[in-house]
Amino acid sequence: MNEPGRADRSSRVTKTSRARLGPIAVLGAVGALAIAGVQESPALGANAGKAAHPSPAVTGVSATRIIGGSAPQRALLRTILATLVPTHVRVLRVVRLRGGVELDSPTQAVRATWEVLVTGGVFFDRSAEQSLPPVLEVDAGPVGWPTLNSGPSPPPATPASVTATRRTMRRLALASGARIAELTVSAPDALAVVLRLRVSDAARFLQDRLRTLVLSADARETRYEALYIEVADARGIAWADGETPLGGAGYIRPSLSACNPFPPPGPASPTYQRCPG
């Protein structure tokens, strides 16, 4: 059995889509995390199972260590990361390549990978605006996303859009019957939304409730720089999906793969599985 948060290199990695617009895609794996089988099972924290009291989008000081790059590049990254506080990204590296740079992190955890993609997408856009070396690729662990695949940038966040999005996501979450463990709306450029839910029966929630929730959140996609949704129960993360204009990452607990309302494309498993919900 793999250590939680580490990659299962033998897992089959595929790309799936939830009928999303543009090049945004979820990386999926059969019975494993999307990114080379990575899975993350962190504690839900002191507020697990309790309705959050969402605060306005604020900035802070990121503890992320930034290696390499010029002083202007590092300053830009610190500015971006400060909007995502608290960030789960421990290390970022700016690596020089022919014709530009690559932004790289060794992380293999789902949410941290999503945060790397959020940071990388904004870094890509602002580097161009500030005449810094072009950002050619964003990497997290063993997986890379070329910036050529980036979709159109959503409109910049405003105080009104932050408030409206927080209100909408809270309404969708509560309508699903789940409890809100975390609801955060950040503004690194456009909106970056984190919604973590706690449920008592993950199989039944995935089978009966998740699809409606996700599609309702996706209907507002043009507002977002990025959207991360996570469903957890007493055992940890059951399902997670993080998407950005560069791409995305997702996870499904292996025992719940038959409950996934957004299965990866390709031939069905030769062994019939039934959702335990």
Image (cartoon, helix red, strand yellow):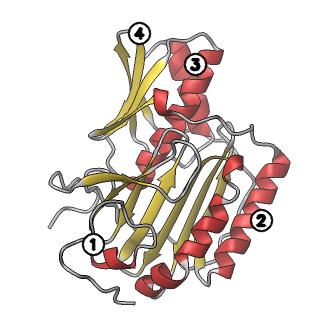
Give SS at disc 1.
Answer: helix
* Callout 1–callout 3 Cβ contact below 8 Å: no
* Callout 3–callout 2 Cβ contact below 8 Å: no
Disc 1 from disc 3: Cα separation: 39 Å
**Residue on which disc 2 sits:** 167
Q: Residues within 10 Å of mark 2 (few under 14, many from 20)?
A: few
Label 3 vs 2, first from the N-terminus: 3
- Residue 106: x and y in percent read 31, 39
Q: Quadrant of the C terminus?
A: bottom left
Disc 4 from disc 2: Cα separation: 43 Å
Residue 42 or residue 95, whichever sits in front: 95
Q: What amino acid is at disc 4?
A: Gly
**Residue on which disc 3 sits:** 127
**Residue on which disc 1 sits:** 254
Q: Quadrant of the N terminus?
A: bottom left
256 lies left or right of 115? left
144 lies left or right of 112? left
Disc 3 from disc 4: Cα separation: 13 Å
* Callout 2–callout 1 Cβ contact below 8 Å: no
Give SS at disc 3.
Answer: helix
Look at discs 4 and 2 and give the one toward the viewer.
4
**Residue on which disc 4 sits:** 99
- Residue 113: x and y in percent read 41, 46
Which residue is drawn at the image coordinates 51% and 50% (left, top)?
A: 243
Label 4 vs 2, first from the N-terminus: 4
- Residue 201: x and y in percent read 44, 88
Label 1 vs 3, first from the N-terminus: 3
Residue lying furthest right = 160
